[in-house]
Amino acid sequence: MMSFASAGRLLFSPKHVIIINSLVTRATLTVHCRNKGEDKGMISLAHRASFDFRFRVNLRKTTVYTCSFAWPGNTATFDIFRADRDDNPKSKVGVCSECIWVIYETAPCRYRRNGGEPNCFPWAS
């Protein structure tokens, strides 16, 4: 049985990104995620709705998925998955195989299924 700690060291480690709309204003959130080779399209999320996708980290561990987020009066961008941050045992937030992101107006926050304090990050733009 593989432990979660070793999951980040596997070649092409499988990832599951989950994005949850938790805007305090309860507005609809429009999400558009893509990487160099794949576009997930525009997704419209009602309050508390979620969108998810799965992929495997590339051999060089350079996989990045960037998402743009829009809600009334605002747009923001954030790297929802970065191999150097989310698939690196040495990063301050550690490895996630299930990367749960809760989106607030103030910040995108990565949660762990088993609880604990979330890791919130500044918007890139």
Image (cartoon, rainbow, N blue to C red):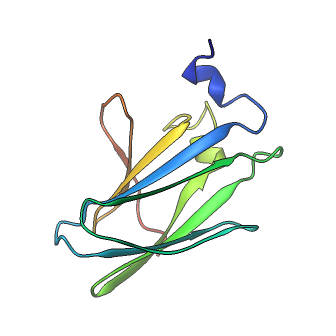
Q: Quadrant of residue 75?
A: bottom left
Question: Image check: 54 left or right of 28?
Answer: right
Residue at 28 percent across and 63 percent down: it is 104
Q: Nearer the viewer, residue 88 or 55?
A: 55
Question: Image check: 92 left or right of 84?
Answer: left
Q: Kindly give the residue lying farthest to the top in the view shown.
A: 1
Q: Kindly give the residue lying farthest to the bottom in the view shown.
A: 73
Q: Quadrant of residue 107?
A: bottom left
Q: Quadrant of residue 13?
A: top right
Residue at 51 percent across and 37 percent down: it is 92
Q: Kindly give the residue lying farthest to the left in the view shown.
A: 25
Question: Image check: 88 left or right of 24?
Answer: right
Residue at 57 percent across and 53 percent down: it is 81
Horizontal and vertical percent position of residue 73: 28, 88
Image quadrant holding the N terminus, namely: top right
Establish if 58 lies above or below 87.
below
Establish if 29 lies above or below 52.
below
Q: Nearer the viewer, residue 29 or 90?
A: 29
Establish if 6 lies above or below 86.
above
Q: Nearer the viewer, residue 40 or 97?
A: 40
Residue at 30 percent across and 36 percent down: it is 117
